[in-house]
């Protein structure tokens, strides 16, 4: 089958190429998915799991991409809850070959049924961004109605979903981003938009900060927290703690039930997924340098399935 492979950690994007690799093996409780569309994270070529397996063994020729939407092609031994031919979407294991391929083996528990009416390209842009936004807001930030939430990168993949979820929960949302993103962020439901270059200090006190940037942005945001407030970072472990609050870092966890909930929100029109440019598998390597608005995805197979 055709797949994008990464061969050299030091080479970064220059080490990616499109070629032929073996069809994946379906282990116990696995599903082989025929990929219709795939999502990826631009920084994943730096992740340890891209280059080693769960036991720490070298995986120098690895397939990137950890979000998938497609059709079940094969069930591994003992797999239940899914059927061959079923539309599914979800997250693949960090330490196994990923989704920028015609087929991918995935643990069945990491996949959810994909409702009719949701395009594969939309579904491929949802899993990591959607789960990250939900877990940051509610599992780690404990956002409640009436609180004020500051969301950095509010027009990005995670940020745009976090804005919508926080607003639906009854929070007051302040979004940050580039000046060109103001209209979009306000359209998604944010009450206020701030360009960080204009300064964050005038925002006032907030209950929760969703930090997608790290660095100086994270440091400045710590000073905005109310007593008992929380900064949740997706970018890097906090280098300091606020005097009267807490700052945490987390890595997203797969969650089949939450994926199903997010898909239903998309199907019913309650949640909008910002899909950016759509690349063919032949052009997937260039997708890693994509800097447009929305999440870039790769269309691999038949989009009508």
Image (spheres, helix red, strand yellow):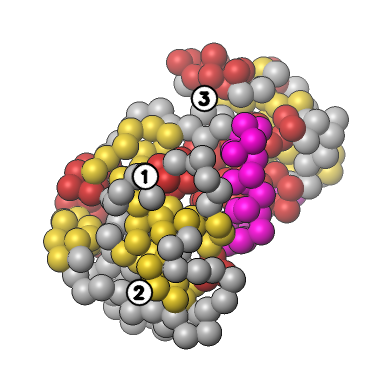
Residue occupying the point 35% across, 52% down: 36
**Quadrant of residue 65 within the rendered picture:** bottom left
Residue 152 appears in the figure: no
Q: Is residue 263 magenta?
A: yes
- Looking at marks 2 and 1 on the same chain, the residue that comes earlier in the sequence is marked by 2
Q: Which mark is residue 177?
A: 3
Q: Which residue is mark 1?
A: 304
Residue 225 at x, y percent in the picture:
75, 35
Q: Are marks 3 and 1 in contact (CB under 8 Å)?
A: no
Against 77, residue 127 (above or below) is: above
Q: Are marks 3 and 2 in contact (CB under 8 Å)?
A: no
- Looking at marks 3 and 1 on the same chain, the residue that comes earlier in the sequence is marked by 3
Name the side, left or right, on which 293 lies relative to 59: right
Residue range corresponding to the magenta coloring = 246-271
Question: Between 230 and 130, which is closer to the camera in this rendering?
Answer: 130
Q: Which mark is residue 52?
A: 2
Residue 279 appears in the figure: yes
Q: Is residue 93 magenta?
A: no
Q: Which mark is residue 61?
A: none
Residue 217 at x, y percent in the picture:
55, 34
Mark 3 packing: few (<14 Cα in 10 Å), some, or many (20+)? Answer: many
Residue 248 at x, y percent in the picture:
66, 53
Which secondary structure, mark 1? loop
Which secondary structure, mark 2? loop
Against 20, residue 163 (above or below) is: above
Name the side, left or right, on which 226 lies relative to 96: right
């Amino acid at each position: 089958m055709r797949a994008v492979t990464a061969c050299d950690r030091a080479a970064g994007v220059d080490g990616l190429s499109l070629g032929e690799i073996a069809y994946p093996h379906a282990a116990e409780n696995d599903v082989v998915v025929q990929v219709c569309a795939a999502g990826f994270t631009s920084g994943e070529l730096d992740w340890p799991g891209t280059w080693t397996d769960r036991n720490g063994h070298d995986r120098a020729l690895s397939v990137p991409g950890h979000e998938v939407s497609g059709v079940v092609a094969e069930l591994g031994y003992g797999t239940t809850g899914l059927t061959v031919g079923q539309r599914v979407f979800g997250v693949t294991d960090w330490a196994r070959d990923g989704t920028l391929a015609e087929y991918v083996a995935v643990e069945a528990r990491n996949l959810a049924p994909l409702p009719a009416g949701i395009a594969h390209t939309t579904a491929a842009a949802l899993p990591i961004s959607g789960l990250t936004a939900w877990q940051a807001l509610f599992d780690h930030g404990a956002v409640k109605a009436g609180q004020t939430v500051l969301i950095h990168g509010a027009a990005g993949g995670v940020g745009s979903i976090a804005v919508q979820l926080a607003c639906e929960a009854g929070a007051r949302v302040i979004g940050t981003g580039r000046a060109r993103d103001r209209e979009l962020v306000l359209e998604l439901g944010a009450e206020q938009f701030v360009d960080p270059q204009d300064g964050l200090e005038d925002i006032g006190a907030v209950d929760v900060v969703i930090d997608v940037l790290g660095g100086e942005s994270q440091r400045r945001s710590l000073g905005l927290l109310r007593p008992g407030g929380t900064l949740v970072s997706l970018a890097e472990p906090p280098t300091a703690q606020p005097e009267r609050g807490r700052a945490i870092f987390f890595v997203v966890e797969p969650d089949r039930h939450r994926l199903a909930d997010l898909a239903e929100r998309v199907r019913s029109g309650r949640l909008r997924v910002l899909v950016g440019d759509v690349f063919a598998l032949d052009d997937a390597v260039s997708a890693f340098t994509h800097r447009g608005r929305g999440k870039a995805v790769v269309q691999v197979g038949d989009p009508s399935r």
